Image (spheres, rainbow, N blue to C red):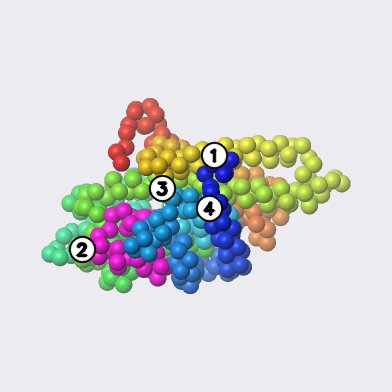
């Protein structure tokens, strides 16, 4: 079935990526989980290999490829058991660079997109605030125009790559409407604080503070007052990435459990022989496969130029809730070892928990679906 979406070229890309991850990334994941950050050299290496520019225009160093290359990148990275590593190296191209590719001026593209694709600059997207993330319209950060600058004041929280980023795309109110500003980490008045968290340990998640940061007026991304619309539009891709990552992580959890179940014995036989566990595996496999095919079909819609807001929300809702369930049940298959850090399930379990929260919570996904399904609300592309 995967041949329907993936060509031989896609599969070759997958194989070479898988080899690279096994050789250059997997051996160091524990170290980066401890350090709470992905090193700069890894960003450089990914940039050198073209992984950050898969969907970007060739004139800025990208390869302008179809959606499936990015999906493969996301899947393979989601399978190596470090949600934090995946978050850090996927947020950069899928959040920060996506906004730049779609909205930045020539000058901004030269300053941020080109080095971003090369992995020389790391980016983050800062929308959520301490006062609330779901209700984007009510954000409190403000930017007031003063001559050739915007005076930026406010704070953001839970920002992926927020501590290590060289630049941030910051949502702020200008004259009451949401706009997006490009903020360099060296700008005076900007500071960041790393947050300790349940999972995603290899990614730095930060609270950001803006105190009278004077942002040059030409660092406005897109048009004034259009930020809410941009955020909603980019959410489709972000949610599909989270959905697709959730499916890949679920598949990996299931595979590792199957392996363990064949090796572990109880009452004189492998635990894989107990019918209750076999049925659990059967149920999870069925749910994963159905969700995977649905997620792929929504990716295809996006690849063909459609704007599948409702379907992307459904995909994100089902895939991340499923990943949460799969990792919980798979951990159970490992018994006490499931709870131990030397075994893979503990990290998989805690990393999966973020899926139903980040990029819009499950409750917000249901709100969007209900509005579109029941009130016939439409979102304009
Ligand atoms: C590790 C991590 C990384 C993140 N990375 C980023 C990032 O890079 N950039 C960024 O901008 N944000 C990021 N986020 C923030 C994330 O998007 C928000 O946490 C999320 O959108 C929820 O916002 P909140 O935490 O303020 O919860 P709230 O909005 O305060 O919601 C609290 C609870 O109320 C529920 N709720 C809210 N409104 C409704 C409603 N209308 N109906 C029913 N229930 C409702 C929510 O579902 C939730 O259960 C990240 C978060 C985490 C944990």
CA gap, disc 3 and disc 1 = 17 Å
Lower sequence index among marks 2 and 1: 2
Q: Which of 315 and 213 is in front in this view?
A: 315
> Is residue 273 visible to us here?
yes
* Nearest-to-viewer mark from 2 and 1: 1
Kindly identify the residue that appears in the image at 78 percent across and 52 percent down: 263
According to the image, label 4 marks what residue? 10
Residue 293 shows which numbered tag? 1
Pointer 4 with pointer 1, Cβ within 8 A: no
Q: Give the range drawn in magenta.
A: 91-120
Magenta-drawn stretch, dominant element (helix, strand or loop): helix
According to the image, label 3 marks what residue? 237
Percent coordinates x, y for residue 224 in the rendering? 20, 52
According to the image, label 2 marks what residue? 218
Q: Quadrant of the C terminus?
A: top left
CA gap, disc 2 and disc 3 = 26 Å
Kindly identify the residue that appears in the image at 12 percent across and 64 percent down: 147
Res 154 quadrant in image: bottom left
Kindly identify the residue that appears in the image at 61 percent across and 67 percent down: 23
């Amino acid at each position: 079935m995967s041949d329907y979406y993936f060509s031989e070229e896609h599969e070759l890309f997958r194989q070479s990526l898988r080899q690279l991850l096994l050789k250059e990334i997997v051996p160091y994941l524990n170290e980066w989980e401890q350090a709470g950050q992905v090193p700069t050299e890894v960003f450089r290496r990914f940039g050198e290999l073209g992984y950050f520019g898969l969907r970007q225009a060739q004139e800025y160093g990208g390869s302008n490829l179809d959606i499936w290359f990015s999906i493969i990148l996301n899947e393979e990275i989601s399978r190596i058991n470090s949600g934090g590593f995946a978050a850090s190296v996927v947020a950069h191209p899928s959040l920060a660079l996506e906004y730049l590719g779609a909205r930045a001026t020539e000058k901004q593209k030269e300053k941020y997109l080109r080095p971003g694709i090369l992995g020389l600059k790391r980016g983050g997207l800062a929308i959520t605030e301490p006062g609330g993330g779901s209700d984007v319209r009510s954000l409190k950060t403000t930017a007031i125009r003063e001559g050739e600058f915007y005076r930026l004041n406010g704070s953001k929280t839970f920002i992926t790559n927020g501590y290590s980023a060289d630049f941030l795309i910051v949502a702020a109110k200008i004259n009451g409407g949401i706009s997006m500003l490009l903020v360099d980490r060296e700008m005076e008045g900007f500071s960041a604080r790393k947050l300790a968290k349940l999972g995603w340990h290899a990614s730095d998640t930060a609270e950001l503070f803006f105190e009278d940061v004077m942002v040059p007026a030409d660092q406005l991304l897109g048009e004034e007052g259009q930020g809410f619309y941009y955020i909603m539009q980019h959410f489709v891709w972000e949610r599909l990435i989270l959905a697709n990552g959730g499916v890949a992580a679920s598949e990996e959890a299931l595979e590792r459990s199957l392996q363990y179940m064949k090796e572990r014995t109880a009452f004189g036989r492998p635990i894989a022989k107990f019918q209750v566990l076999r049925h659990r595996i059967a149920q999870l496999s069925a749910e994963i496969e159905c969700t995977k095919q649905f997620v792929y079909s929504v990716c295809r819609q996006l690849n063909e130029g459609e704007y599948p807001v409702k379907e992307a929300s459904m995909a994100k809702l089902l895939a991340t809730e499923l990943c949460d369930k799969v990792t919980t049940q798979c951990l159970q298959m490992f018994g006490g070892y499931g709870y131990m850090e030397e075994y893979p399930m503990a990290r998989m379990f805690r990393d999966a928990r973020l899926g139903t929260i980040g990029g819009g919570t499950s409750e917000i996904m249901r709100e969007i679906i209900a509005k579109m399904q029941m009130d016939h609300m439409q979102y304009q592309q």
